[in-house]
Amino acid sequence: MSDLHEECGVFGVLAKERSDVASTVYYGLYALQHRGQESCGIVVNDDGLFTDHRDSGLVNDVFTQDEMEKLGLGDMAIGHVRYGTTGSSSRMNAQPIVVNHIKGPMALCHNGNLVNSFELRERLELEGSIFHTTSDTEVISYIITKERLSASSIEEALCRAMRRIHGAYSLVVMSASKLIAARDPHGFRPLCFGTRPDGSYVIASESCALDAVGAAMVRDVEPGEIIVFERDGEQYGMRSIREHCGLCAPSLCVFEYIYFARPDSVVDGSSVHEARVRAGAFLAKKHPVEADIVIGVPDSGLDAAIGYSRESGIPYGMGFIKNRYIGRTFISPGQKSREDKVRIKLNPIASVVRGKRVVLIDDSIVRGTTSKRIVGLLRDAGATEVHFRVTAPPFLNPCFYGTDIDSRDHLIACRHSIPEIAQIIGVDTLGYLALEDVHCLADKSACGGYCDACFSGKYTTDVPSVREKSRFEFKKSERLEKE
């Protein structure tokens, strides 16, 4: 139950025949709901005619039966779930973005964060572009649209755009006749595709969404790769464009394995569940303790708790029940609200922890406030000792690639030592995953490299000129005042 949020999840489908593609996207987004709970959207392509619906809220709230019927049938569709890092959390920033252009319509959705978004946006505005949102995605859509004026195809325009945009992006792009998947050359965020028994192609942020719609995974989109799915007359298939492949060292966000991805997903060839179990085993080796029971904080702490239990021999138990019906938008932000939300969302099973020395496993400690309240719940339920083990190293640096950590000021590990943090959150002992073990979590991964900048401070790219995302609008207004 982390304080962290990841930007979003993307999904797309190309069917062989006109059908209810909107429902396929709906189920795919439902499987990706953990990646974004602020807003969602679907765009259906019916022979070049785009119909869309976007709004704030969860998938099953936004897409009522009425709205699904309005989307109608089509041969292609894309969808998106969002938790915003760049851009405010409002309906106007809901995706996919739809662009009507002289070269034809385009819909686009994006998972990630650009490091040169501010500079690109300034240049586009000075050239006359008018922005309707505050998200990176509109910047990407404008650049692709401008490139389309001289490019021979939308995939060529996207290929050119990738020379200008820097940072993390996994994209699903839909034109009148093509569905396109693209992943940044570093491969910061996951993206994969598969096929359904009826021959449909499906693109998704995670393999769990392919499973949800009955698609068999074919493979991950490689870092820097563009894959074009299309129907050309009687021809129906896919082709790969690899101009940007191999230009950079792979750098998948390692927090996909620690927290973001669903445990039933396979990311770049490695099981997320197994990676988390391995994290728990590493913690048991590095931070052993005498205890009676090991419990995990739902959801990402559960797999690691199993790993810790197996390695240590301490019995595993279910220490918390999670209310599955509360999303991140359930209560507005605020100190008292966060406290109430933790209590409503998690409830300890007193009979499991009462009178016990408990090993508590969670994925991270960001500000420390949530961790302190979870420990308090265990103490109130009668736990005699609480030994906290964290499946990530201490957060020491902001992330510029799509994780909602925008300032060192908010990170407890930047202000306090580990013994001090243990005292603040009220635990008997505290142990973090070692940085060297982070790179050993996904033993079968085909990625070849990971981004650990939030722990190590070693960034894969140049960092943004506007370091804190919250200062973006201030910087813009300051420039306008000078003009």
Image: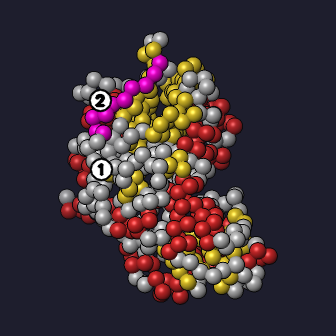
Return the x and y of residue 135 as percentages of the image width and height: 40, 51
Task: Tell me the element at label 1.
Answer: loop
Q: Position of residue 431 (x, y in %)?
A: 51, 77
Q: Residue furthest top?
A: 234
167 on left or right of 333: left
Note whether 389 is above or below 64 in the view shown. below
Q: Is residue 271 left or right of residue 173?
A: right
Q: Which residues are magenta?
A: 236-245
Mark 2 lies on a secondary structure that is helix
Does label 1 or label 2 sit earlier along the sequence?
A: 2
Q: Identify residue for label 2.
A: 156
Q: Nearer the viewer, mark 1 or mark 2?
A: 1
Which residue has dot 1 on it? 249
Q: Residue at x 25, y 61 (%)?
A: 465
Q: Is residue 398 above or below residue 359?
A: above
Residue sitting at the far right: 351
Residue at the extreme left of the image, as rendered: 483
Give the left or right position of residue 73, taking residue 351 as reference: left
- What residue sits 57% from the left and 69% below the top? 362
- Apparent side of residue 433 relative to residue 466 in the rendered image (left or right): right
Closer to the camera, 261 or 475? Answer: 261
